Image (cartoon, helix red, strand yellow):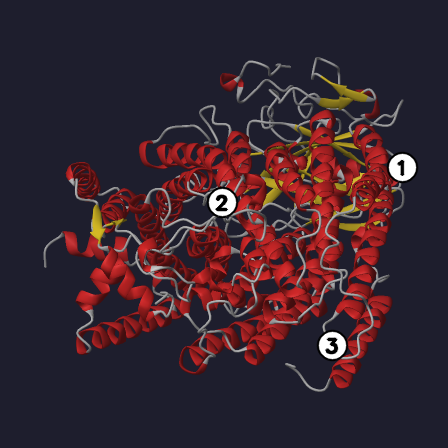
Amino acid sequence: MPAFVPYLLHTLFPPTVLRPTEIGADVLIVATGVIIVTVLTRQKKWGWLWREWLTTVDHKRIAVMYLIAAIAMLFRGGVDALMMRTNLALPSVHFISAEEYNEVFTTHGTIMIFFMAMPLIFALFNAVIPLMIGARDVAFPRLNAVSFWLFAFGALLFNISFVVGGSPNAGWTAYPPLTELAFNPGPGENYYFLALFISGIGTTITGINFLVTILRMRAPGMTLMRMPLFAWTTLCTSALILFAFPPLTVALGTSLLDRLFHASFYTLGHGGMPMMYVNLFWLFGHPEVYIVVLPAFGIFSEVVPTFSRKPLFGYTAMVVSVVAIMVLSYGTWVHHFFTMGAGPSVNVFFGLSTMLIAIPTGVKIFNWIFTMWGGRIRLTVPMLYQLAFIPTFVVGGATGVLLATVPVDYQLHNTYFLVAHFHNTLIGGTVFGLLSGLYYWWPKMFGYKLDERQGKWAFWLFFLGFWVTFGPQYLLGLEGMTRRLWTYPLGLGWHALNLISTIGAYGMGAGFVVLVYNVVWSMQHGERDLTGDPWDGRTLEWSLPSPAPEYNFARIPVVTERDAWWAMKARGETTAVRVRPDEISALELPRNSAMPFFLGLGFFVLGFGLTFRWWWIAGLGLAGILGAMLWAGFDYEDRKHVHAEEIRRIEAALGRLEA
Amino acid sequence: MALPHPRVRRAWVRGALLAGILGLALTGCGPHYVLLHPAGPVAQGELHLMVLATIAMAVVIAFVLALLAYVLWHFRDRPGRTAPYRPDWTHSRRLEVLWFVIPAVILTVIAVPMVGQTYALAKLPPKSDPLVVDVTSLDWKWLFQYPQQGVATVNYLVIPTGRPVLFELTANSPMNTFWIPELGGMEYTMSGRVLPLWLEASRPGVYWGHSGQFSGVDFEQMFFTVRAVGPSQFQSWVATVRRTAPAMTEADFRQLLNPGTVGTLTYASYPANTFPAVTHGFTLNGGMYMVMGNQPKDNASQPMGSGAASPSRTSREAMHTMPGMSGR
């Protein structure tokens, strides 16, 4: 046996990846992989997978790939959560070890934010925004695919950490000096920094892409103040991404320099300043909170009018408040560390700025409620999530004001009160919002509705489970329980509430199972959407067939007011969806490309090599990245020509061509 | 509908609510709710503000919930509904101004005392004579040094009641926070920095403290106990420690720096230069934040101040002095 083999085995498979839970997960992964490969081979689907999906630049297909990845990550993050809750169910339970617990809470937070919430948001951006603003694609379709593959390979790099090398274990915030090489010698934190770095590049590109798409590609007549509110929140989210991710990139990059090349930006000795990392991280981290919640606000601003049969109340105030939130969110980051001794004046400033941001948020809540006032409210699943969102998010916002009250935060910082607060906003806001949006736009994405009855079961399990999980955690905070404790002694009186919380978490897990069942069942038996407008919608995407053809609009619509599709229907333009053959002309559409896939792969190899400091592998990855970029640079045939006849044929098949 | 008959569901909800409220009433006042049972003026002040903010926020929550329930009840699309359908009512300047102003007013109610309290907590009470405790968080233990008394403990504190205690916080490890919930809010311990925090116990008792910032594998061992005793008992405790406990040697100190856990330890003295003198720039002394200078520590309260135990703090980290930091 060559001498390097034991070294290799020990590096790739240290004891931390050989625990029973890890082995179990590995077996599941291998089994799933085998099944997928078998099915693809049997059905001869490899070519189809490559041509139709892996190399696609169509925003609608990219949306589906984001969605699949996000649901898988929701599963992984959820399993992490259940492992934590199981360990905390009773005092001194040692279901998993402290080491494993620390890895699990780290991956739970990181995955839920970066690899679940973000891709789910991008799934909806991709699925909806071009259709909503009357565009044929995003501004940079190929870059859109690059974004996806950078995210996907970043997520893959992060997720293989528990299979090879060991997971990160310093929390999703990865504060130094705990992440310093001296305190954290394994590859886990390298995985964390590199995976976030890679997917962060993709996220930044997505931000640029949608910023340009919305500013430059709206249908004629759709002025900014005629845009649907989801387009507004997407615009603001993209702007937030553009300015919030650079500080994160700096924080990740400098931490990597500390770990890989023994720099001393944040080290315990040698003049390192760990608090600088904390500032940089939250300079990104607080806008990030709004990056994930603004899209939810946008979704609710579409769902509420549709299911109340009434235009959005106070449209101008809604736009102003979104923009206000966007601007203010850059000025609140210190509230994540009032207890780091910045002095009373700094703390007071950031406490007040944080309270200030509650005002535009409150305006939005009232406007949604008054959109329903005088409407005809239909209690569909998307609407149920919205109705659950309001009380949940209001409690999350109210406890946020408590935490912004500086002296109160001195007591509540890093307790379970804080944990409950941010889950109220992130689940009550972001997740409820995204689920609402998924149920709402699912027929547009896939051509069939998700079953309402099953959807309601999933909703009630998830919603009640949420409150049973996180309601007690506020009280645990008042009992002094701090976060990230892997176990606790009996005498502190924390056990009863912890047990209730764990029961709730399993309720949420059951909700997820029903949700997945709902999707699988509806694929076969769900009500097909033949009209393209199953909810009696208000915005342009509902004027298209479900799912929309590759080119979206055979004829770009002309917009004269807000809620353009509703107005067309109200004017009796029943033929609005029909196109005369002479209105159709030939189109240039973006051509599929394998470059984004290989670019992502190159980044993955680079990241893997750097994680283990195997420089030649890193060099290989770097060469791959440069090669893919050169390839892209000299590939002039990035568009394909579609004949008018072809489009007429497709429109006729959809029943939308006038004879 | 999704679940059983609406009436059954309503009964469920009512039952769950009732159980919740009862449960709260039964447990809400229990002694385990350490944040609700302050044992000193700092925690008391923070609790007052928490109660004020909670009441203000409860008003908001109750109002929103009532409004939502009303809207749902009246404007649901169901047979026999009487409320008018008003699809054109999409704007009301008066209402929009109203729900801009009302939250602003409610927030002002919280913000004004918040500002006052934040500044107040940054100062020691006037004319107070604080006991100074130098706190170092280590992997995974707490080192407490009493510079005025010259003694040191690990993982437990003894403090006098009725006298402010000025904790000077630093770390020789990844970050932690120093927190004694019944006495008041937490503050980070960070290497290369000394942050001030003052707390006071009004009544004798045993309180627990903990870290709020995850610091590695034995993080859950970062609990410590605080025994608050009368001033004379405190003096006799110091005297007993000086008489009976061993001295901390350099080797003992280095041993403590090693990662690992220990129980509680007591030392009659400790070596000099084991607490950094170069600080972030602030300390609490003489009633307000001051740049750490050469103020002599309160040696008068040291009846048996032996030369060996009185640490002159030349900096262990002087080489890391940075602009903006002031040396002692």
Q: Earlier in the sequence, mark 2 or mark 3?
A: 3
Residue at the spot 77% in from the left edge and 43% down from the top edge: A408
Q: Which mark is residue B78?
A: 3
The first of marks 1 and 3 along the sequence is 3
Q: Chain of mark 3?
A: B
The answer for which chain carries disc 2 is B
> Disc 1 to disc 3, how far (Cα)?
65 Å
Which of A466 and A519 lies nearest the eye of the viewer? A519
Q: Nearer the viewer, residue A135 or A54?
A: A135
Gap in angstroms between the C-alphas marked 2 and 1: 36 Å
The quarter in which the C terminus of chain A is drawn is: bottom left
Of all chains, the one bearing label 1 is: B
Identify residue for label 1.
B162
Identified by mark 1, the residue type is Gly
- Is there one chain holding both mark 2 and mark 1? yes
Q: Amino acid at mark 2?
A: Pro
**Residue type of the residue flagged with mark 3:** Arg
Answer with mark 2 or mark 1, whichever residue precedes in sequence.
1
Q: Quadrant of residue B179?
A: top right
Q: Position of residue A442 (x, y in %)?
A: 47, 67
